[in-house]
Image: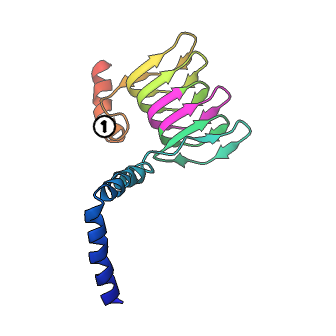
């Protein structure tokens, strides 16, 4: 078998030498294959929790979540969208938080947006925030450079700041 493959290889090299366009054609699909291998790396679509779903417990993902139902527990995600029919009772932590519904609890996010239908009862710790006219918000707002990770470790730092304000 080894002798046959060695015989076939020089023959295929001779065939390639007579047809230089043939190697160029396989070379084009080869870069397309690495592009295909990089294509699965993008995140899947957001997980949707429908309006008839009631969850008791914490949710944690590196992906995106769209909540339309009720969650009693903490949520951590990359992009979190709270639908108009949704109610969250717990702490919400995400890179990007869009609130259309109701949250009772603390909100932590790099970007936090309360739309006109939002109802938030709790503190918001953010890097950037947008509150549309008509949104209902009861709580305090605190800006931090990184509200996600060092937020817990900077609580001791936040308490002296609170003491200075008092």
Find residue 21 and report its image quarter: bottom left
Tell me what residue is drawn at x 42 percent, y 51 percent: 36
How is the rendered protein coloured? rainbow
Tell me what residue is drawn at x 58 percent, y 11 percent: 134
**In the image shown, does 89 or 62 lie closer to the viewer?**
62
Q: Which residue is mark 1?
A: 154
- Kindly give the residue lying farthest to the right in the view shown: 52
Tell me what residue is drawn at x 31 percent, y 72 percent: 12
Q: Which quadrant of the figure contains the N terminus? A: bottom left
Find residue 158 and report its image quarter: top left
User: In the rendered structure, which segment of residues is drawn in magenta?
Assistant: 79-98
The picture places residue 76, in percent across and down from the top left corner, at 48, 42
Tell me what residue is drawn at x 27 percent, y 22 percent: 164
Q: Is residue 82 magenta?
A: yes
* Position of residue 46 in the picture relative to residue 3 (left or right): right
Establish if 67 lies above or below 166: below
* Position of residue 4 in the picture relative to residue 132 (left or right): left
| Crowd around label 1: few <14 · some 14–19 · many ≥20 (10 Å) | few
The picture places residue 41, in percent across and down from the top left corner, at 42, 49
Q: Is residue 154 magenta?
A: no
The majority secondary structure of the magenta stretch comes to strand
């Amino acid at each position: 078998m080894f002798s046959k493959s060695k015989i076939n290889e020089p023959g295929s090299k001779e065939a390639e030498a007579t047809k230089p366009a043939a190697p160029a054609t396989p070379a084009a699909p080869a870069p397309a294959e690495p592009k295909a291998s990089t294509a699965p790396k993008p995140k899947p679509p957001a997980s949707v929790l429908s309006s008839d779903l009631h969850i008791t417990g914490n949710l944690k993902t590196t992906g995106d979540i769209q909540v339309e139902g009720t969650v009693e527990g903490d949520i951590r995600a990359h992009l979190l969208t709270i639908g108009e029919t949704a109610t969250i009772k717990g702490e919400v932590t995400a890179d990007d938080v869009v609130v259309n519904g109701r949250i009772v609890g603390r909100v932590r996010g790099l970007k936090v947006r309360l739309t006109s239908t939002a109802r938030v009862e709790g503190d918001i710790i953010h890097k950037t925030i947008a509150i549309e006219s008509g949104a209902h918000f009861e709580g305090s707002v605190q800006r931090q450079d990184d509200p996600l990770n060092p937020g817990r470790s900077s609580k001791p730092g936040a308490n002296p700041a609170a003491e200075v304000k008092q």
